[in-house]
Image: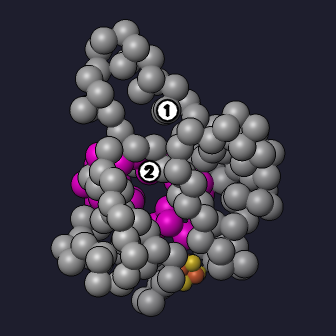
Amino acid sequence: MNEAHIERMKDLPSTHLLGAGTALCAGCGGLEMLKEAYDILGENTIFVNAAGCMTLMSIYPFTPFRGSWLYTSIASAPAGAQGVRDALDVLKQSGRMSEEEDLQVVVLTGDGAASGIGLSSTSGAIDRDLDFIYLCYDNEGYGNTG
Ligand code: SF4
C-alpha cells in the first residue's frame, strides 16, 4: 500500500498515474479528485466503479488506468468492492498471494449511486465496517444520463 502524508497542495505528486484524454466533461471536478487520489493511492489500486459519469473513462479496449478496473451496475459498487476485498484476503490467507502483491480496493461512485439508487449497498458496506476506500463525487445531477 502507498501511504502519503499530504498537508499542502505542493505536497501532491507532480507526476500523474491517470492517463489523459478521457471522455468526461472538460474541467470535471470529479475527474480532478480521482487524478489526485490515484496519485496518492498508487498504482496497486483496483477501482470498482458504479455506473455513472466515470464509466466513460474505461471503455474496452481503452483505459487511462495503470491497473485493474471493475465496472458494476449503478447500485452495487460497494458489494462488488467487498467481493474483491474478500477474494484478495482469501488469496493472502491461503498463501497464494503475498502482502506486497495486495491491492488497495477503491469504490468510485457518484452521489446517485452512493446515496440514491445505491443506498442499500452503501449502508451494507458501512455495516460491514467498510474495509475499502470509498470515493464519491457529488454532482447532484445524474450527469451521465440526465
Ligand atoms: S456531468 Fe459528470 S463528467 Fe460532466 S462535469 Fe459533471 S461529474 Fe464530470
Residue 20: x %, y % from top left: 27, 76
Question: SS at mark 1?
Answer: helix
Q: Which residue is mark 1?
A: 85
Q: Residue at x 35, y 39 (%)?
A: 103
Image quadrant where one finds the C terminus: bottom right
Q: Residue at x 61, y 47 (%)?
A: 77
For the residues marked 1 and 2, what is the alpha-carbon distance in whole angstroms? 11 Å
Amino acid carrying mark 1 in the image? Arg
For the view shown, which residue lies furthest in the top direction? 94
Q: Residue at x 53, y 43 (%)?
A: 132
Q: Residue at x 40, y 44 (%)?
A: 104
Instruction: Say whether disc 1 or disc 2 marks the residue closer to the N-terminus.
Output: 2
Q: Which residue is mark 2?
A: 47
User: Dividing the image into four equal quarters, which quarter contains ligand 1?
Assistant: bottom right
The question of residue 71 being in magenta is answered with no
Taking depth in this image into account, of 112 and 145 the one nearest to the observer is 112
Boundaries of the magenta span: 44-68
Vertically, is 90 above or below 16? Answer: above
Residue 6: x %, y % from top left: 37, 71
